[in-house]
Amino acid sequence: MDTPEPRRSGWKRKVVLAVVAFGGVVALYTWTALHLAYSRGERVGYVQKFAHRGWVCKTWEGELAIATVPGVAPEKFYFSTRSNPVAAQVNDMLGKRVRIRYDQYKFVPTTCFGDTEYFVAEAQPIDERQ
């Protein structure tokens, strides 16, 4: 007499597939949040602070002081960058008047990619003799 084979449940396979599917969705969301800019713009001011920070994910974090008129407290614009060449550009202009071009990325899932949602793409010095 043939004994029936034990019935194999596919719960392990379902759990693995669910974990893989969830990981895929998270990866796709992260890629989209980091590659589709919400807005782009420029700011002009003086680079006050610039530091390489983070325990695991090292990013460059900076502060731009935007002075509208003399005698008024400057507005501070906080920005990030993950690019070492851009960081070198900004570092060369500490304390100088500079124009930065940035991309704004909304809903980045973690601060591992940067402390702010504004990521500098380029920095240019401004000639103050004009």
Image (tube, helix red, strand yellow):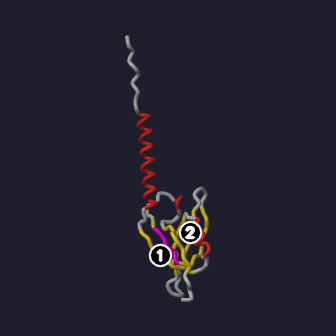
Say what secondary structure mark 1 lies in. Answer: strand
Disc 2 residue type (three-letter): Val
Q: Position of residue 65 (x, y in %)?
A: 54, 78
Looking at the picture, which amino acid does disc 1 mark? Glu
Q: Please tell me in which quadrant of the rendered image residue 87 appears.
A: bottom right
- Residue at label 1? 42
Q: Secondary structure at mark 2?
A: helix
Majority SS type along the magenta span: strand
Question: Residue 19, how many percent across, how many down?
Answer: 44, 43
16 lies above or below 111: above
Q: Which one is earlier in the sequence, the residue at label 2 or at label 1?
A: 1
Is 3 situated left or right of 80 in this image?
left
Residue 40, position as x, y percentages in the image: 44, 71
Instruction: Count how many numbered circles sit on residues in the image.
Output: 2
Q: Are marks 2 and 1 in contact (CB under 8 Å)?
A: no
Q: Residue at x 53, y 79 (%)?
A: 45
Q: Residue furthest top?
A: 1
Quadrant position of residue 37:
bottom left
Q: State left or right for residue 93 relative to residue 110.
A: right
Q: Residue at x 48, y 66 (%)?
A: 117
Q: Nearer the viewer, mark 2 or mark 1?
A: 2
Instruction: Report, in whole angstroms, how far the alpha carbon at label 2 lies from the one at label 1.
Output: 15 Å
Residue 1 is situated, as x and y percent measured from the top left of the image, at: 37, 10
Magenta range:
99-103
Is 95 in the magenta?
Answer: no
Residue at (61%, 78%) from the top-left corner?
A: 95
Nearer to the camera, 70 or 94: 94
- Name the residue carrying label 2: 86
